[in-house]
Amino acid sequence: MASHAKPREDILAVADASFAEPNDTDLGPIPGCGYGEWVEQVAKHRDVAAVLCTRHREALSDLRGRFASFGVRLATGASTSENAFAVENKDVFAKRIEGIAPLPRTKRVDGAEEFVAALKEFDDVERLCVKPVNGIFGRGFLQIDPKAGLLDALTALHGRSVSSEVLAHALASAKNPEPMLLMEYLPGEEYSIDMVCDDGRVIAAVSRHKTAHYQIIETRGPQVEIARAVAAEMRLDGIVNVQTRGGADGRQNILEANARIAGGVAYSAPAGVNLPAIWARHATGRSVIVKHLAEPVAVRINASAFALPETSALLSSATTETAA
């Protein structure tokens, strides 16, 4: 079964049963109080055994015990609201993970003054970068380059960069600048590790390395071991993702964790490790056999176009009403 808050027919149409989610963000367990109660009602009414949450994960994690009392396994990305908050906030996450896994030098900065002061602390670091404390899909990531101007940050397709002077001016000019992380830039190869976890215990893990034309799928390597350590410390739960990147010495470092399904999770199934299926079987008490890849597997996704009949009907109805 699947649900979504928007009429995403492309997602909902492939499920055996689908539901439109309420937009109310209130998560109280009292009847009529919103999203959390809605999930509970659907789970009870449709005899659901397990729910993989991708929305309101931090708040829903506090309802895990309530759902367990009537036999529903609720996976919220992390087993406690405290850990869910830490994963979502990269500055808190960096402090939590220090000493657990290799980590680039990192410091939170709030505004221009803190940014300029932090630059002095990082004076011995050859290359620096910044990114927002909260964000996904690489939003706001910039390399610090003394030769880069504003246009380099605005127009570059890859490797966006800006000088520290331009960034400091932008922060000083902003009314409420978003908190950012000043970090040591890691020049090595980046890996994305997708995992099925049960309260920090890794049931299955797949590493993906992106190239220009395909992704390389593996089930072993130092990046996988780092991801396992992060999962245990943060008590990750469900289908989650950890990202690592190599430093100048070639050693992999932890970049961040995501208490949700990564967009590239589908790459692993053609290689022989179907993570959503593994989670579904494990969460419902069925036996699980995890394939370990002896050699790397190259996988590429080709997009396919298909018509959306329900959405098309809505468009036709709206056109008819407008014409009338």
Image: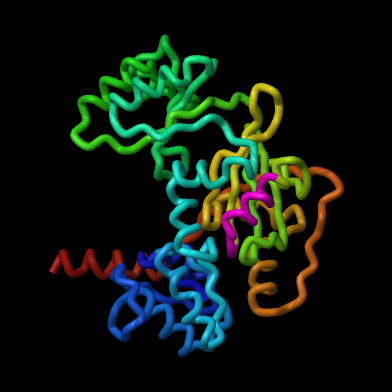
Instruction: Find the residue positioned furthest to the right.
Output: 294
Residue 268 x/y as whole percent: 69, 53
The answer, for residue 299, to whether it is visible in the render is no
Residue 180 x/y as whole percent: 38, 35
Residue ID at (47%, 15%): 123
Residue 287 falls left or right of residue 7: right
Look at the image and give the residue range highlighted in magenta. Answer: 226-238
Q: Tell me if residue 235 is in the magenta stretch.
A: yes
Magenta region, main secondary structure: helix
Residue ID at (37%, 17%): 164
Where 118 falls versus 15 (above or below)? above
For this rendering, which residue is in front, 310 or 247?
247
Residue ID at (71%, 63%): 203
Snapshot quadrant of residue 42 = bottom left
**Total number of numbered discs in the rendering:** 0
The C terminus lies in which quarter of the figure? bottom left
